[in-house]
Image (cartoon, rainbow, N blue to C red):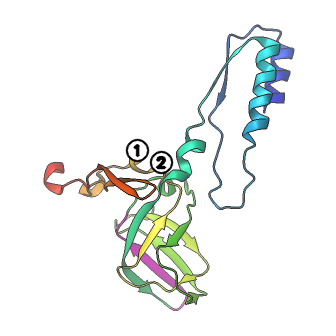
């Protein structure tokens, strides 16, 4: 990307005061992507700064906080058929909007693991009667039952900031964990306050 920007600077023969690098620094949602080399990226920017005396603007937001949070959810019902299990969660698209907005995939991991793996499609969905109220589809998953808890990963940049009261659903609580200490940042909303 830096090379492309430098070519544009050279070809335009224009003296730029600012160059916006945007916010395209992602995180590894599936634990299999190549990570951004921040040292290399930083030195590339520094060399351009020296050459062209230009100010750079960029927004690294999600690369800093995207993987710092997870949404803890509970299984409220397992609807089973011969080919598929629908795992209905107490979290919904109002709590975490990103999969509904543009079909993003976020890992869902059990808080307690077991060795009972079912080779069957698992659809993780919310309780709102909307086709977009779904989080993830997997070809196999461990056996789940009502009241099992799961963690939807990497919601730090998109969770509570995109949450809403759609369908009169209260927003979830936010809890900050620092080493072994817990602090409630915001309490779960009360339905009476929404109405």
Left or right, 58 with reference to 123? right
Quarter of the image for the N terminus: give it. Answer: top right
Q: Which residue is mark 1?
A: 161
Cα distance in 3D space between marks 1 and 2:
6 Å
| Rendering quarter of residue 90 | bottom left
Q: Which residue is mark 2?
A: 158
- For the point 55% across and 38% down, which residue is it? 61
| Rendering quarter of residue 19 | top right
Task: Please state the extent of the stretch shown in magenta in the rendering.
Answer: 82-91
* Magenta part, dominant SS: strand
- Return the mark for residue 54: none
* SS state under label 1: helix
Left or right, 130 with reference to 34? left
Percent across and percent down for residue 44 are: 80, 29
Estimate how packed mark 2 is, as few (under 14), some (14 to 19) or many (20 or more) residues with alpha carbons within 10 Å.
some
Q: Is residue 86 magenta?
A: yes
Residue extending furthest toward the front:
180
Percent across and percent down for residue 55 are: 67, 16
Percent across and percent down for residue 92 are: 38, 62
- Judging depth in this view, the residue of 45 and 134 nearest the camera is 45
- Tell me whether circle 1 and circle 2 mark residues in contact (CB < 8 Å): yes
- For the point 72% across and 13% down, which residue is it? 54
- Judging depth in this view, the residue of 121 and 73 nearest the camera is 73
Q: How many marks?
A: 2
Percent across and percent down for residue 177 are: 41, 55
- For the point 48% across and 89% down, which residue is it? 81
- Judging depth in this view, the residue of 125 and 151 nearest the camera is 151
- For the point 57% across and 56% down, which residue is it? 104
């Amino acid at each position: 990307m830096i090379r492309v920007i430098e070519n544009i600077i050279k070809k335009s023969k224009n003296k730029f005061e600012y160059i916006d690098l945007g916010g395209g620094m992602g995180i590894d949602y599936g634990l299999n992507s190549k990570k951004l080399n921040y040292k290399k990226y930083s030195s590339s920017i520094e060399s351009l700064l020296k050459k062209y005396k230009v100010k750079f603007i960029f927004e690294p937001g999600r690369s800093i906080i995207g993987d710092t949070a997870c949404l803890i959810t509970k299984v409220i019902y397992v609807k089973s058929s011969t080919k598929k299990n629908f795992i209905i969660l107490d979290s919904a698209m109002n709590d975490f909007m990103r999969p509904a907005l543009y079909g993003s995939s976020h890992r869902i991991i059990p808080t307690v693991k077991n060795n009972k793996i079912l080779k069957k499609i698992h659809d993780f969905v919310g309780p709102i009667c909307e086709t977009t109220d779904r989080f993830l589809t997997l070809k196999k998953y461990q056996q789940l039952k009502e009241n099992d808890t799961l963690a939807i990963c990497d919601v730090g940049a998109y969770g509570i900031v995109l949450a809403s009261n759609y369908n009169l659903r209260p927003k979830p609580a936010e809890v900050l964990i620092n080493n072994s200490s817990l602090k409630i940042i915001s309490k779960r909303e009360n339905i009476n306050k929404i109405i």
